[in-house]
Image (cartoon, helix red, strand yellow):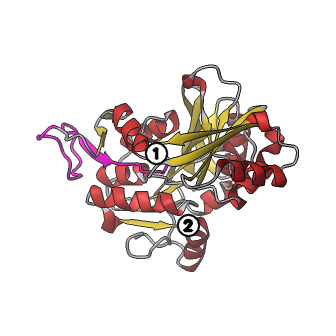
């Protein structure tokens, strides 16, 4: 089924009211882009946390609607909700449904992270002698078969790559890992394939939890992965604090390893929650941090975590360390 895409250019401070109006009109999805970017490579997509504004002074907001929506009706309704909106800043485009899968399949090729870990798109078969079952081996690949669907996380983004490389460098045998902001489930599934005993994936987007469940099933680790919304994760942890089996206790329990790949704003706010969700001595990593945002987070996380270090890729940062004993 094709879609109707509505695009409009607004100032940063107008973004919250625009998203609210588009939601009222029935938008199926909303994405934000830098309106001043000159090339496709500069067109970074931003998924803000609650109450968080993008860094760009002007934003292109893209909203998808069912193809049967009337363009004039949508424009008129949007004008009523946003009287200040300039008509020449609004445009419509048709988006073919098959384009989503085609673009992903064309751009996403097998990629390696660290010594053993490989991410393969679901439509490409790995070599027959590779380890696609999940047994750890220094001489054989550990392969994750992935279809991100509509969720974030394919390995192509620098923040995901930084987290995958960090996981590949850990001894995960028998450990329980929490992946906060799990998206497609790529980090949790990779950890399980690298030897972790169980994993908890947390995300505020139900579509992400569906994608993560599908990818866990695709990789034969669904029984080891518990998935939940943030509020359920907090409640479960409070009820069964200290449980060591995510598979046995749902989303409850402090993690042996903790990773969160979201954005700097939520990372700062959630630091106490993350500290409570990690066992003493647990390795942790956070990413989704733009270069220049790390100093405030380092100061914040130093209240609960030791051995803090910063690693970068392109304009993105990963902070890692250990939960203080």
Numbered circles on residues, count: 2
Question: Measuring 52% from the left and 37% from the top, which residue is drawn there?
Answer: 159
Q: Residue furthest bottom?
A: 239
Q: Residue furthest left?
A: 129
Magenta region:
127-151
User: Which of the two discs, 2 and 1, labels the residue nearer the N terminus?
Assistant: 1
Taking the image as shown, residue 98 lies to the left or right of residue 301, namely: left
Q: Residue furthest right?
A: 84
Identify whether 224 is placed above or below 291. Answer: below
x and y percent of residue 264 in the render?
67, 43
Identify whether 28 is placed above or below 137. Answer: below
Question: Measuring 41% from the left and 54% from the top, which residue is drawn there?
Answer: 188
Q: Secondary structure at mark 2?
A: loop
Question: Measuring 36% from the left and 35% from the top, which residue is drawn there?
Answer: 108
Q: Pick the residue in front: 219 or 131.
A: 219
Q: Does residue 122 appear anywhere in the picture?
A: yes
Mark 2 and mark 1: Cα distance apart in space? 17 Å
Name the mark on residue 229: 2
Q: Which secondary structure dominates the residues rendered in magenta?
A: loop
Q: Which residue is disc 1 drawn over?
A: 153
Instruction: Say if the magenta span includes residue 150.
Output: yes
Q: Which corner quadrant holds the C terminus?
A: bottom right
Identify whether 65 is placed above or below 95. Answer: below
Q: Pick the residue in front: 102 or 229.
A: 102
């Amino acid at each position: 089924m094709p879609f109707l895409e509505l695009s409009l250019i607004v100032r940063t401070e107008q973004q919250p009211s625009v998203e609210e109006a588009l939601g009222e009109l029935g938008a199926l999805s909303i994405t934000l882009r830098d309106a001043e970017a000159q090339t496709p490579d500069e067109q970074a997509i931003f998924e803000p946390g609650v109450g968080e504004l993008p860094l760009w002074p002007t934003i292109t907001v893209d909203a998808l609607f069912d193809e049967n929506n009337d363009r004039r009706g949508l424009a008129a309704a949007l004008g009523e909700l946003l009287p200040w909106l300039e008509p020449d800043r609004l445009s419509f485009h048709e988006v073919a449904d098959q384009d989503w899968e085609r673009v992903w399949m064309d751009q996403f090729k097998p990629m390696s992270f660290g010594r053993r870990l490989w991410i393969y798109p679901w439509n490409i078969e790995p070599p027959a002698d590779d380890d696609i079952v999940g047994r750890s081996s220094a001489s054989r690949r550990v392969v994750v078969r992935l279809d991100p669907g509509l969720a974030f996380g394919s390995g192509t983004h620098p923040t995901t790559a930084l987290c995958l490389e960090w996981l590949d460098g850990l001894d995960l045998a028998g450990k329980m890992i929490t992946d906060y902001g799990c998206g497609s489930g790529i980090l949790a599934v990779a950890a399980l394939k690298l030897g972790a005993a169980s994993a908890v994936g947390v995300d505020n987007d139900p579509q992400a939890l569906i994608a993560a469940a599908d990818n866990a099933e695709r990789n034969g680790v669904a029984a080891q992965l518990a998935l939940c919304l943030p509020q359920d994760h907090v409640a479960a942890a409070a009820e069964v604090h200290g449980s060591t089996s995510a598979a046995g206790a749902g989303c409850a329990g402090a993690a042996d390893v903790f990773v969160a790949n979201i954005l700097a704003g939520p990372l700062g706010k959630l630091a106490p929650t993350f500290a409570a969700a990690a066992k003493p001595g647990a390795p942790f990593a956070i990413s989704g941090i733009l270069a220049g945002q790390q100093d405030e987070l380092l100061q914040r996380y130093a209240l609960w975590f030791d051995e803090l270090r910063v690693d970068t890729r392109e304009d993105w940062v990963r902070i890692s360390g250990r939960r203080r004993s």
